[in-house]
Image (tube, rainbow, N blue to C red):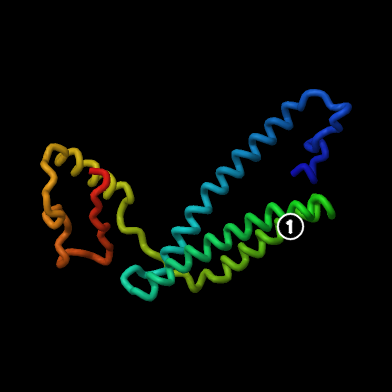
Amino acid sequence: MSQIVPRLKPCDPVTCGRSLGLHEVIFFLAMYLISLGTGGHKPSLESFGADQFDDNHDEERTKKMSFFNWWNFALCSGLILGVTVVVYVQDRVGWWQADVTLTATMALSLVIFLAGRPFYRYRKPEGSPFTPMLQVVAAAMAKRHLPLPSDARELCEVPKTQMTSKRLLCHTNKLR
């Protein structure tokens, strides 16, 4: 934005006084927009990627683990490129060229994402996500005074005949 609006560029440190209120407003607005944008798309993309695999098939479950490995590799590679190559271009070539490079990279990634749209799996929502959480809290409150059974098989679980495609979590000895 400072490339387009010259008043937003920092002034000369020798002749510069206190920063303008406009600079502070733009700075904090940019910080909030970055956190809002990052907080919105990163978790959504990861869970959308996980939805592309079926947990009931062993081969797809293995591919899902590989997906997260490659996801983290690409994320770290992008961070390394961002703090090396982009900074190098900013210092040696110019800020404008670095900004155009980043904008083109984001546009290319959006085009690739949208080009794959016909091949994505879309899972239909199954009720409210808050219902199971509230059920767990209600059951925990109702059963908080019951003694813990010595055998984990006596814990209340859904019978295998009534199970849907969802997996059950493994029993642990933590958080008693």
Residue 44 at x, y percent in the picture: 48, 55
Question: Which part of the image, by quadrant, shows the N terminus?
Answer: top right
Q: Residue furthest bottom?
A: 59
Q: Residue at x 24, y 42 (%)?
A: 137
Residue position marked by numbered label 1 in the rendering:
85
Q: Residue at x 26, y 47 (%)?
A: 174
Q: Amino acid at mark 1?
A: Val
Q: Nearer the viewer, residue 54 or 112?
A: 54
Residue 126 at x, y percent in the picture: 31, 58
Q: Is residue 106 left or right of residue 69?
A: right
Q: Residue furthest top?
A: 18
Q: Is residue 36 left or right of residue 26?
A: left
Q: Name which quarter of the figure residue 102 lies in.
A: bottom right
Where 102 falls versus 147 (above or below)?
A: below
Residue 103 at x, y percent in the picture: 70, 56
Q: How many numbered marks appear?
A: 1
Q: Residue at x 11, y 48 (%)?
A: 149
SS category of the residue bearing label 1:
helix
